Amino acid sequence: MLSLVVRQVFSLACFALLSQATVGQDLSSRIVNQTAFQTLANKGGIATMLVSEKTLTLNACGKQGEGRLCCRKDLRHCLSAGSAMRIHFPQTCLLEKNDSLHIILQRNDQDVARQIFNQETFDKWHKTSAFFNGHTLRVEGAGPSALRCIEEIEDNSSTLKLEVQYLSEIPLDDNVYSLPEFKALFELLDSRQTSTHPAIGRLFPVETPVQVCTGFLSNNWKIITAGHCLDNIKSRRPVFELNVPPSRPSGELQHSDPSNQFPLKENIRRDKRSATACPKPRSGHDWGVLCSATALPKHARKYGFRISTTAENDAAIKVAGYSAVINPRNRNYTLQSASGRMQGEIRKTYSCLSHNVYTTFGNSGSPVYLKKSGDIKTVIGIHVANSADGNKAATAFNNPCLRCVLSGGEICARCQIAEYREELSCN
């Protein structure tokens, strides 16, 4: 029983990218693996597409329906599929002013969620939809250019791509079993509690083994995370999700309403030279700063974190992030928080700090903040790694390049990397 649970924990964020549709038949003749967007040979499809005069209906599981029968042969160890999906529209699909595309999630023949694209938002979303919790989507066009987009997909269905979420049972090798994050899942004293915070979000999918990282808003509304979470961001197209709902009883991720998902600009700044324990040479150099491409809600911006470069030795702290949970599984990769203490002082030489708060997979990018800091939390670090000795590593905000990218000013002169010597603009 334990081995089954472990395998599921490691694969709950799996998404497959499907492409090259044939109208009325197979929507997919290509697929990529879970963690890299490299095309593999087709081994049978699972999706169907129906086109009417103004409507495109996409069913990621075809006649099989969601679940075990929705699994493809090339989704290794697949237990079920179709619990969520998103659409990648062709890059040649152009919306003109006053035209729109409407993406509608259907469940039991009822519309339960909707996303509307106009010319501006379609480009800001990089022509990729939000994630929807289901396997059947309807796309409706309003206006000549939107209808041409649907016609283009009908005439050349290979230009359309879907991402379909699936749960798999992937055997783990010895290297994974030895990871500190894996060992943390089975500690008897898991002190985490389900939490809420309007300015802490989930980054998904990212280029990490579990495809989940955490991000949080600064008080000038930039998104802060770990640098190692931002590999291949242009191909992965992660979203920043706020108000994330509980996962399924199986542990499969469920996604925020499209109104609480935010696409990211490509003008990221990040340093990923280190995700190691503190203090070690090169530690304290794992950070990322990025911008939402669409407006963040006022409530989230109101509670953006106040940044501090100092804290007392042995200060009481908290870490909150979207981390892996084995039991109960509906908490898996939802917002969890735990308390602990700093271990020693903030290292000025290495721009890092150590702490003993319970963390595991998905916590990368989590805010490390002072426990007694009022409604507007005071953040002192970005959680980046666990270590074998039980201490955890975080990048501290006395890193001059990080502070320059966040706020600019005189600190920029102390940054030794030229590309980080100016504030990142989110305008």
Image (cartoon, grey):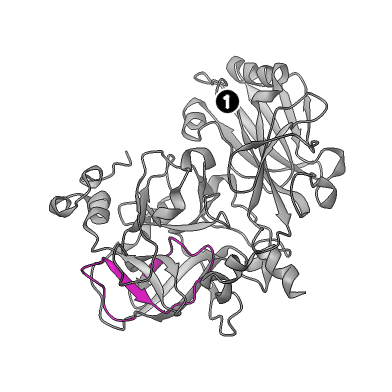
Q: Position of residue 15 (x, y in %)?
A: 65, 47
Amino acid at dot 1: Ser
Q: Position of residue 137 (x, y in %)?
A: 71, 37
Magenta segment: does it hold 275?
A: no
> In this rendering, would 134 be left or right of 376?
right
Q: Say if residue 193 shows up in the picture.
A: yes
Nearer to us in this view, 332 or 293? 332
> In this rendering, would 166 be left or right of 334?
right
Magenta segment: does it hold 358?
A: yes
71 above or below 225?
above
Nearer to us in this view, 159 or 232? 232
Q: Position of residue 314 (x, y in %)?
A: 31, 84
Quarter where residue 189 is shown? bottom right
46 above or below 330?
above
Point 38% across, 60% down: residue: 303
SS assignment for the magenta stretch, majority: loop
Q: Quadrant of the N terminus?
A: bottom right
382 above or below 411?
below
Point 35% across, 49% down: residue: 270
Q: Which secondary structure, mark 1?
A: strand
For the magenta stretch, what is the residue range? Answer: 343-368
Quarter where residue 115 is shown? top right
Using a 10 Å C-alpha cutoff, classify the residue at mark 1 as few (fewer than 14 neighbours), some (14 to 19) or many (20 or more). many
Nearer to us in this view, 233 or 406? 233
Point 76% across, 55% down: residue: 77
Point 62% across, 65% down: residue: 332
Q: Quadrant of the C terminus?
A: top left
Q: Position of residue 299 (x, y in %)?
A: 42, 55
Residue that label 1 marks: 100
